Each structure stands twice: as structure tokens, then as C-alpha cells.
Image (spheres, grey):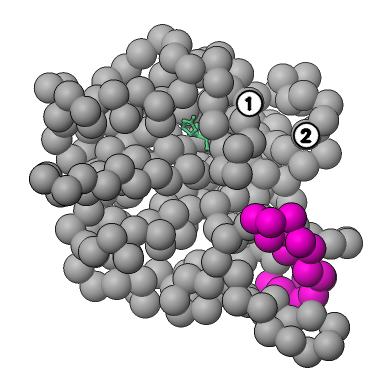
């Protein structure tokens, strides 16, 4: 089966990646769509997928590492995508734990990793990547306009979507192999250099919707994110959502 599958429109590339996995695909198979009608984000959110203006892709891999190492593939992917966005757009790309790429203070890309666990064969990870490449201000819905940007808005010119995909695809497969072989330590310092929240007043909304407000201490070596509340208690964040509490 072809390794790069290009389609015009789908509901979600992550969703059809699961159908391909059921049929049996090689590690490194990627699905890239010109548009999505129901792009998925983390925590049940949706991903606005303006036709022909962004990169909407899912890369299917069979990682050569254990299941308990899968969760940090999100962080490794974030770093790969941030490096490429910065290289291509020239703007300073930062990371908001665990999976947002921030350009000029606003979200420009997001990552949705999903594991497909299999008893008989080896496990798969679907790495879904959405990058706002050529969206203009009028393409962004008003509800998310204050927090969302694109490479074109920041740089003032458009970029080649396919060229961006090729760079992401190549660098990501290499980075995941390196992560599986050598661990997260080689990515850790670079991730911290790009940390958007570190030192800022931050609000952590847990999956059960409790809210903790404190100072962002930063990423720990095991991939958790640390927040210290006003009473000095340290919170080790493994799930939920982090946002900057005030500017
Ligand atoms: C997030 O920021 O919460 C994650 C967004 C991930 C969006 C990408 S677009 C391609 C792939 N297919 C999806 O349905 N979602 C991911």
C-alpha cells in the first residue's frame, strides 16, 4: 500500500487512519487531506480545517518502544513541528504543554496522538498534526480569533503546504526513532527552551474540571508539567489543559 495517501476531503485524518490500520498498513504510512469536515482536537475539541489553507495529516507509526513511552511522542512531535514552523516562517515558535505550537503568542498548530493497541500484532500510534499555514484573519472563527494565528498571518506571505508536510514527515520519523532508541533526554532541553508557559501565572483545568492556579515551573524530565500553587504545593500535571492565567 502507498505510503503517502493524499485525499481531497475527509471527516478526520486520524479517524481514517484507524480504518487503514484495520486493513494493515506499514509504519510510516501518512494520510494528508486538503480539508476536514470534523477535524478533532484534544479533550473533545474540534480543529478548524479551512480547505486548502492548512496541513491536516496523520502519520501512522509502529514505535520501537514500550507502551508506557508512547505518551511522550506528543512532546517529541511538538518539538519537531515547532522547529519546522520557526525555520519556514521565521517567527519564534513556542510550545504549550502538551501539544500546542504557539507563534507570536497565539496557537498556530496542534497535535493529537492516539494509540491503537493490538494484542496479536505490534501497537500503532497515530500522530495527527494540524498546522495553520495560509489561513488569513478572516478564515479564523471569531470565538477563537484572539488565541489563534497562522504562519501566513505572522510572516505576511503564504507557504507551500506540501513542502511543510515533507519536512514534518521526514524529521518526525527520524525523531521518533531516536526517541525510541535513546529516550527523551536528548529532546528535553530543547523543549524547555521553547516552553511558552514557564514562569507565567498558569491555570490548570483537570479532566474532572477542577481548576488549579499557580506558577508554571516547567517540564519535568519524565514529561509531566509542574505547577506551584500560591501555598507552595507542587502539582504534577499529566492530563487536562493548561492556559496562561493572566498577561
Ligand atoms: C489540538 O490542538 O487539540 C490537536 C489538534 C490536532 C488536529 C489534527 S488535523 C489532522 C489530524 N486529524 C484530526 O482530526 N486531528 C488532527
- Residue drawn at (63%, 26%) of the image: 48
Please state which of residues 109 and 234 is positioned toward the viewer in this rendering: 234
Q: Can you tell which quarter of the image residue 158 is in?
A: top right
Residue 213 within the magenta-colored segment of the rendering: yes
- Please say if 188 is above or below 56: below
Residue position for label 1? 48
- Location of the C terminus by quadrant is bottom right
- Residue drawn at (22%, 58%) of the image: 177
Q: Secondary structure at mark 2?
A: helix
Specify whether residue 155 is in view: no
- Please say if 60 is above or below 23: below
- Location of the N terminus by quadrant is top left
Specify whether residue 55 is in view: yes
Residue 58 within the magenta-colored segment of the rendering: no
Please state which of residues 191 and 118 is positioned toward the viewer in this rendering: 118
Q: Position of residue 124 (x, y in %)?
A: 25, 44
Q: Position of residue 86 (x, y in %)?
A: 54, 49
In the rendered image, the residue lying farthest to the right is: 246
Instruction: Report if the CB atoms under discs 1 and 2 are less than 8 Å apart.
Output: yes
- Please say if 35 is above or below 14: above
Q: Position of residue 53 (x, y in %)?
A: 56, 20
Q: CA distance from mark 1 to mark 2?
A: 10 Å
- Residue drawn at (60%, 70%) of the image: 237
Q: Earlier in the sequence, mark 1 or mark 2?
A: 1
Please state which of residues 171 and 197 is positioned toward the viewer in this rendering: 197
> Which segment did they paint magenta?
198-216
- Residue drawn at (74%, 87%) of the image: 233
Residue position for label 2? 144
Q: Residues within 10 Å of mark 2 (few under 14, many from 20)?
A: few
In the rendered image, the residue lying farthest to the bottom is: 232
Residue labelled 2 has its Cβ within 8 Å of some atom of ligand 1 = no
Amino acid at each position: 500500500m502507498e505510503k503517502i495517501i493524499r485525499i481531497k476531503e475527509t471527516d478526520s485524518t486520524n479517524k481514517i487512519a484507524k480504518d487503514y490500520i484495520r486493513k494493515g498498513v506499514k509504519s510510516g504510512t501518512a494520510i494528508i487531506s486538503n480539508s476536514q469536515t470534523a477535524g478533532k482536537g484534544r479533550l473533545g475539541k474540534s480543529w478548524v480545517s479551512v480547505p486548502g489553507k492548512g496541513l491536516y495529516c496523520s502519520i501512522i507509526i509502529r514505535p520501537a518502544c514500550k507502551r508506557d513511552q508512547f505518551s511522550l511522542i506528543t512532546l517529541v512531535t511538538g518539538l519537531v513541528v515547532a522547529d519546522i514552523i520557526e525555520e519556514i516562517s521565521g517567527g519564534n515558535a513556542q510550545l504549550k504543554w502538551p501539544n500546542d505550537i504557539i507563534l507570536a503568542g497565539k496557537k498556530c498548530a496542534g497535535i493529537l496522538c492516539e494509540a491503537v493497541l493490538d494484542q496479536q500484532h505490534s501497537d500503532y500510534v497515530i500522530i495527527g498534526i494540524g498546522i495553520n499555514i495560509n489561513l488569513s484573519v478572516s478564515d479564523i472563527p471569531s470565538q477563537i480569533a484572539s488565541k489563534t494565528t497562522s504562519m501566513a498571518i505572522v510572516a505576511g506571505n503564504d507557504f507551500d503546504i506540501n513542502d511543510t508536510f515533507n519536512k514534518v514527515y521526514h524529521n518526525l520519523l527520524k525523531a521518533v526513532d531516536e526517541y525510541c532508541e535513546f529516550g527523551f533526554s536528548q529532546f528535553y532541553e530543547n523543549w524547555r527552551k521553547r516552553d511558552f508557559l514557564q514562569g507565567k501565572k498558569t491555570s490548570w483545568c483537570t479532566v474532572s474540571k477542577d481548576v488549579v492556579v499557580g506558577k508554571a515551573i516547567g517540564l519535568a524530565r519524565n514529561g509531566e508539567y509542574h505547577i506551584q500553587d500560591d501555598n507552595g504545593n507542587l502539582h504534577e500535571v499529566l492530563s487536562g489543559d493548561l492556559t496562561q492565567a493572566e498577561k
